[in-house]
Image (cartoon, rainbow, N blue to C red):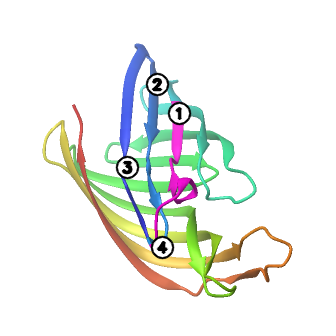
Amino acid sequence: AATGLRIGLGVFVSDNVLFEIETNPGVYSDLEGTLRSKDYDFPSHAMFTVRATEDFFFKIGARYNQVFEEAPWLPLLGFSWQVTDGFRVDVLAPEQIELSLWPSASTAFLFGGQVTGAEYHVRTSAATGKQRADLNVQEVVAYVGLLHRFSDHVSLQARGGLVLGGDYDLTTGGAAFDRVEGALDQAGFGEVTFGISW
């Protein structure tokens, strides 16, 4: 299970440059037994968005998370392009691409793909005494969604779709532990996010 907060800050450093920083401190664990330091994580990113034209924005930054097990720290590169009124393309490599249709300034229909994942600290019965282990999960998802802004400060987003593929890796890192890894089956998913900003 994963539970936590999403906290962010955005500030314009000039008329054409926005700096954003966000962190998601939380617990990534099966919640069995006493929580320890490895049960906590804080996926985070920092990013500059630079306006090149009225309709095109470059994005550059860095992020920390466990989506790619061997590369928790990676640069972020991308862009946002308003192709026409009411149609936008957002790309943020290496993790997401999204197309959005905006029938009004407050409502968008979302269509996208994303690589997601995390590392969970779990107890496994594969060893005597329910040994603690790390479970890395990575998923490739395709989704549709709806974003509605009730005001400049309150929004609601709902997404649903399919897990197209992915893999998992369970290990303690110990030489005597029989590592377990494999591919994930396709499945559906859904999520609802409520946002408040000020």
Toward the front, the furthest residue is: 129
Q: Are marks 1 and 2 in contact (CB under 8 Å)?
A: yes
**Circles 3 and 1: CB atoms closer than 8 Å:** no
The mark found on residue 30 in the picture is 4
Secondary structure of the residue carrying numbered label 1: strand
Residue where numbered disc 3 is placed: 87
Which of these two is toward me, 24 or 166? Answer: 24
Please name which of the two marks, 2 or 4, marks the residue nearer to the observer.
4
Name the element at disc 3. strand
Q: CA distance from mark 2 to mark 4?
A: 35 Å
Residue 171 belongs to magenta span: no
Lower sequence index among marks 4 and 3: 4
- Answer yes or no: do the residues labelled 2 and 4 have beta carbons within 8 Å? no
**Residue 18: image location, x then y, percent:** 44, 23
Query: Is 67 left, or right, of 40 in this rendering?
Result: right
| Residue 55 locus on image (x, y percent) | 43, 32
* Image quadrant in which you'd find residue 191: bottom left
Tell which of 22 and 143 is nearer to you: 22
Position of residue 125 measured from the top left corner of the image (x, y, whole percent): 62, 87
Q: Is residue 135 left or right of residue 171?
A: left
Q: Nearer the viewer, mark 4 or mark 3?
A: 4
Q: Which residue is the site of mark 1?
A: 46
